[in-house]
Amino acid sequence: MLEVRGLAHRYGSYAAVENLSFTVAEDELACIVGPSGCGKSTLLRCVAGLIKPTAGGVTLHGDPVDGVPADLAVVFQDYSRSLFPWLSVRGNVEFPLRTRVSNRTERRKRAEEALAWVGLEAAGSKYPWQLSGGMQQRVSIARALACKPALLLMDEPFASVDAQTRADLEDLLLRVRREHGSTVLLVTHDIDESVYLGDRVLVLSKSPASIVADLTVTLPAQRDQIATRGSARFVELRTEIARLLHDRPGAPPPPNAANSDALAAERFLAAEREEARQQSSH
């Protein structure tokens, strides 16, 4: 469905991403995880057609991406800047449909459907500034879903909310995807989130970003915040991703490295959680 081949992008002399190649199959949820500043958001903007890559290319349904495809939607991290404060919640969800759906009644129907999917059917007449951060991000998700995109791109969508709201939104995404079907490419710096949500996790190196590993998440399709995160396989996967991000790509583990790898992974994860906490407090 989505194919990225030899993608590279530079800002002047600075290389943000370099020679990235991967595919995302229909109905798959693929997560991209990497260090802060490694080029994850640049990659997503190239995939979305918001910027033209310096080299390589992106195809969706076999067609080259040159500009934003009509059947693609994006959910950004900063919900407070992506919603129009002078429009109602329903108006925000309807807004992108103005260029896609000519019938006003159909636009209203699709907006109300999408708000119901995210549990905000009673909030349509409110304004974004009357909602909590988590509810505002639900509006952003509803706006994307109302477009019925073939591909949904999400750029650190839960990074600006508190931990409990993040867990609720993660489960919301899994439920909506299960009930309505979506192909999703989600960028995150949170290792636990990538394992919990993803069918696959693409691990990126430091900038300029290249793919260090492409891991299949061998967890049951039904995820649970307590049972899944407490499972041995979940811990193995997050530790492996932390090791890949912490170590040099391809570096062999030193002798008797099991304990040191686990400690290094825990330190890395603790640093990631602290960074997320600081972001959510701003």
Image (cartoon, rainbow, N blue to C red):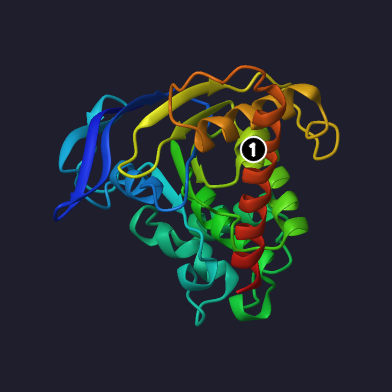
Closer to us: 111 or 127: 127
Quadrant where the image shows the N terminus: top left
The residue carrying mark 1 is: 264
Label 1 is placed on what type of residue?
Ala
Q: Nearer the viewer, residue 173 or 119?
A: 173
Mark 1 surroundings within 10 Å by alpha-carbon count, few (fewer than 14), some (14 through 19), many (20 or more): some
Q: Indicate whether 94 appears above or below 25.
A: below
Residue at 70 percent of width and 40 percent of height: 266
Is residue 273 shown left or right of residue 21?
Answer: right
**Residue 31 visible in image:** no
Depth order, front residue of 249/65: 249
Examine the image and state in which quarter residue 132 appears: bottom right
Residue at image coords 53%, 26%: 27
Q: Where residue 137 sits: x, y (%)?
A: 60, 61
Residue 193 visible in the shown view? yes
Q: Residue at x 70, y 36 (%)?
A: 263
- Under circle 1, the secondary element is helix
- Res. 248 image quadrant: top left
